[in-house]
Image (cartoon, rainbow, N blue to C red):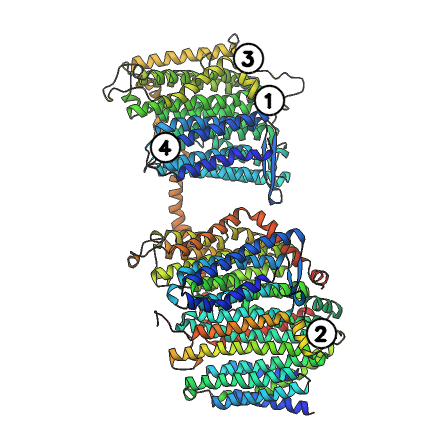
Amino acid sequence: MGFVAALIFIGIYCLLTMRNLIKLFIGVEVIAKGVSLALIASGFERNNIYIAQSLTITFIVVEVSVVATALAIIINIYRHTKSLDIRKLTRLKG
Amino acid sequence: MVFTFILVPLVMASLMPLIGKISKKFLPDILTNITLLFLLIYSITIGRQIISSGTGIRQLVWLGQQLNITLALDGFSLLMLFLISLVSFAVGLYCINYMEHYGSKAVFYALFLLMIAGMNGLVLATDLFSIYVFLEVAAVASYALVAFGLGYDELEASFKYLMLSAVATAFILVSIALIFGFTDSLRLHDVALAFQLLNAKYLVGLCVTLFIFGFGLKAAIVPFHAWLPDAHPSAPAPISAMLSGVLIKISGIYAITRIFLNVFGLNPAISTVLMYLGVISILVGAIIAFSQNDIKRMLAYSSISQIGYIILGIGLGTPLGILGGLFHLFNHGIFKSLLFLNSGAVEQATGTRALDKMGGLAKRMPITAATSVVGSLSIAGVPPLNGFWSKLIIIIALVQAKAYGFAIVAVLASGITLWYYLIIQRQAFFGKLNETWNNVKEAPFWMSASMIILALICIAIGILFPIIIKSWLVPATNVLSAGVYYTINLFRF
Amino acid sequence: MIQTLLLTALVIFSILAVLLRDLLKAAISLAIASIFLAIIFFRMNATYAGVFEISVVAGLITVLFVSTIALTKSDGDVRESKVVSILFPIFFVLFIIIDIFVMKTLLNRLMVVRYPAPTGNFGQVLWGQRTLDLVGQIGVIFAGVFAVIALFRKRDKKDE
Amino acid sequence: MTPANLLIPILLPVGLGIISFLIPSKTKLIREIISIIGAGVIFYVAVVLFRIKNLNYIVPWAGTGIDFDLRLYHFSGFILLGLSGFLFLIVLYSSIKMRGHNRIREYYGYVFLTAALANGAVLANNFVLLVFFWEGLLLTLYGLITIGGKESYRTAVKSFIISGFCDFCMILGIGILWYATGTLRMSDISVQPHGLTAVSFFLMMIGAIGKAGGMPFHTWIPDAAIDAPVSVMAFLPASVEKLLGIYLLTRISLDFFKLQVNSAFCITLMIIGSATIVLAVFMALIQKDFKKLLSFHAISQVGYMILGIGTGIPIGIAGGVFHMINHAMYKCGLFLSAGSVEHRTGTTELKKLGGLYREMPVTALCFAVCAAAISGVWPLNGFVSKEMIFHGSKETGYLIFTIAAWVGAIFTFASFLKAGHSTFLGPRTKDIPRVKESESLILLPMIILAGLCILFGVYNKLPLTLFIQPILEGHVPVGEHLDFSNHGLAVANPIAMISILCLFIALAIHFYGWNRGEKRAYLASEPIHNLPVLKMLYNKSEARFFDLYEQGVKVLKGLSYILFVGVDRTIDWIYEKFVTFIGRTFSRALSWAHSGNYANYLAWCIAGLVIIILFIGKLLR
């Protein structure tokens, strides 16, 4: 469990400090690794690996959809701004 | 068969692009709205059965073989299904006119139906992980729908929404993994039973916190609300209506309520945390909404504030509080969608969302103005419209539970709510007609029709609220106030 | 012991993925981290999950990342601040200490409910017990596909 | 007949109102036919319900004692009958009189809505329901007055505020009563008024009197008489509001509160009643406009009813209630005949009218009958009910009230002599061209009403035994007989003699004034107008010095100036400087915090997570 926490920490640190949109998304991916590790580890501990595996596979499929959507959005943003800087994405505020 | 609620929109959504190849607009319009109407009627008819025969746990049979799909339809999920189908039906009608110039109507409808399928699945699921999966179905569809306009604002909002949600769902999954690790099952019944045996209050505390982050972000509870005032105004108006009216309630509040009340059991600590979160949301939402100039952004902040009321009522945990919370949830779903649809009609007619540029639109758009007056008065809690009764019930429940401080805040904030909705009315619809809008026209037929339907529902619920409470809300409240024992006794399969 | 080493490698490559300036290298580090994760899965008897992790995450997602990076071609124009990389070890060590401390106290207090281990093989479990998730998977895949179609469509009019 | 049929008198008029509102205003005849038939059906239903007597219809509504509870019993059935009868007559009359009015759709809509609300208010057996219908009437009253034209808005607002004040008092009274008794079911409440419930009694009394139009809540009626259509006047202040107000007053003083004869409450009521009689009749006497004169009488006659009910003695109460139904009939008839005159001549100013009896004989006759009835001429219905009130008030021992009532009788007759004389008799003026008699549909309601006046007078046993006496059953001591009809038309007793003497005095006054005024009938009241003290009072009154509303407006204006300088500016300053400032600052600070920065938002979430973890950990410990 400690490693899961570490992975999530790395991911959130990335999200909090990085500026490149793709880099931010890599942060999300790192968190996702932590999550799938957590699922499998729980199953392993409980001697119930089959269910844990099916959960993980479902999770991976979900992740792929999210990644595809997110990257499509990122490419669209790039088309608008010609930049990938999160700091420029502050038009909506107040 | 309960599975219809998931299957029909899913199948229709998958067919939609093919249909779109045959006919660009006409067939998708018709088929989508028929599907939505079917779901609405089906939820009402099935509702009667459920009310007469009690909770329905359905195990699916396919080709004579038992499938391991277990869905639970009880008073609470029925109320949610009804809300989803009602609002999505009205929104579907609205889309016929509104989405004309966005292009790719078929894909739009496909995503729209997927979102509904996801929410229906979430409501019917009896397993924590299934709840997560359907949450993601609705969420992925909603990311795309928010960005559907492909403008800069839409993309920015959608991106932030996605990134915050991704973290939130990660935390939900961590919590699910924890629960799986400790109870060896994810079915609500097993989990509830295991927690009763374990009596592990720290584990519950940890999971509750993670869930509050995860689902609370979906529900836009302060301080997890920041994506909402970006995403809701940027989305196309019907999608704003869906998001504010239904999605945040299903993927946020439904999940929180179901898990906290029926699986973990509401203990004083959880209750206190929820109530404080509710009050903070009420205040922050109301105060920021006050100084907005963008009409949709104001509505979005007001959603945060109203969500606070719901959380406050449900977090109180007394049957009356839960009843008030659920009633407010239902009402808010209706009038907030109405208001967003109004704002969409105004935006389409004038091309602006800035309140200070509007003025006197009531003369040009009487239907929009009249329905928005109904919506505003409802949300501000003016008797005898529906919002009044639900807020009243929440406040009575607070007073009964001797939570006077919370009650005072609730009353005060409803004053502020009235105030800023009067500002909307005065600046947008009444007062002197801004000459720029001299040749503005009333919204097209289907848009007007859907706004009128929602406004009439607001009035009807306001007058007939005893009937609504009796037939729809009391069963839902009974499910929730029975607490953990409800799940343990009834979800056994 | 080997498990711990593998886990450490996973964490290290994740850190690299986050901290490396070059996006392409970062993406590849992420893929390597995925492969380590897959190996861990194999060692935990989670073969199918491992296969998925390698093929989908290390394969498909990396491809997606790389193609995005290629499409945007802007690795250089966003300067990450250097302070971030310098401060990272400090925060990380701090976190690890808190983490170990919390985990020890927390895990010791918790009890566990044990159910008999399920019988049957993986296919039966996936199809027999998680059928609804499969329906959900179909929904998610559709949603993802339609989302991409919607986001890459040609706008008819009203392009900003 | 099932209890659910009690909904018919409420829902049917609503439906009719909506239908006639939806019919385009250009359409002729259809609206009128539907309305007349509909009103006829409502009247029929009321008759059937009156014969059934006892029905109770309860639907749970809002919980905690607030039910949708309708109760039909003798009294409410009687009022229902009266309401629907008047509705029918007014619709009949309006079919000609209001034809072609540009707001005809709204007019019919409001009339039927008023009927529905009034029926609901009468049938309601739950205070919340009562208030619901009662307040609804406020809106329709406002709407109906505004139909009069542009000038009428001011009057409408005035009536709205005055009635609104009275209704507010009533709601307050009901609230106190609820607090004291713990129930909202009207038929369950019966208390001795003392302490808190006494306050409640007074508040509810204000509500009832205000609805009936007693002093000092009367001032909108004369204004409305000028502005509003005459059929509205005949419908609302003359009949419906009287019926409702006196109905509630009777319920208050008979059922909800057990009033003792000559208790402080009774004396208060009697003082209000007799003051209303005398003051309003003096105002009526000097009016030079037909409709305005009638409207002051509408106020004055309320005084008799309040006086009668205030006596607390069975015969007085019976007289008050009987007077209510009588008054509704002849005052409605009088307004309608005024309307008929206006319909043909286009004016109601007495100065311009004269000698119309040849051209409009039926109108003149109906007017004569109704005027005689209101003045209490033997053997019409007014005589009977007034006698009963005189007897009742004399029995209390306070002769002063009886004398006040007699004074009222004198000047009532005098003023009607003046009105009738100057309208229908005397020389024909040149101000108006030759006219014809009105259409038969206008005459028919008047003939019916005049006929009823005669019937109820000559054969007073019928209404008394059929309608009035059952109301008092259970309120008289056991063994006492409940038959007032022997008082009926008896003249061989001192009270009746004095009453008749009063009529002769009135005649004398009229002829004296007529002679003094150079045989011009509309000046017949001038000698009284010019009496030393009275003249001053009259002048002040004409200048609306005694109008509480107008005075209130003046006082408020003065007060508001003082407040504006003293308080408002100060509060404004505080508001500007503190409340707005703090609000703005908060709002701005929060807006500023929503900077659009993703990392920022995520940081809040994480911070929130940590705080909640710590908080929950602390709570769980």
Quadrant containing the N terminus of chain B in the rendered view: bottom right
Towards the viewer: D119 or C42: C42
Q: Label 2: few (<14), some or many (≥20) within 10 Å?
A: many
Q: Which residue is mark 1?
A: D470
Q: Residues within 10 Å of mark 1 (few under 14, many from 20)?
A: some
Chain under callout 1: D
Residue D98 position in % (x across, y down): 35, 30
Which corner quadrant of the image does residue B311 belong to?
Answer: bottom right
Which residue carries the number 2 mark?
B184
Separation of marks 3 and 2 at Cα, in angstroms? 94 Å
Q: Position of residue D266 (x, y in %)?
A: 56, 26
Residue C21, x across and y down, in percent: 48, 90
Marker disc for residue D487: 3
Picture quadrant of residue B253:
bottom right
Amino acid type for the residue under numbered disc 3? His
Q: Is residue B469 above or below residue D169?
A: below
Residue at left offset 59%, top offset 57%: B79
**Looking at the picture, do discs 1 and 2 lie on one chain?**
no
SS of the residue under disc 2: loop
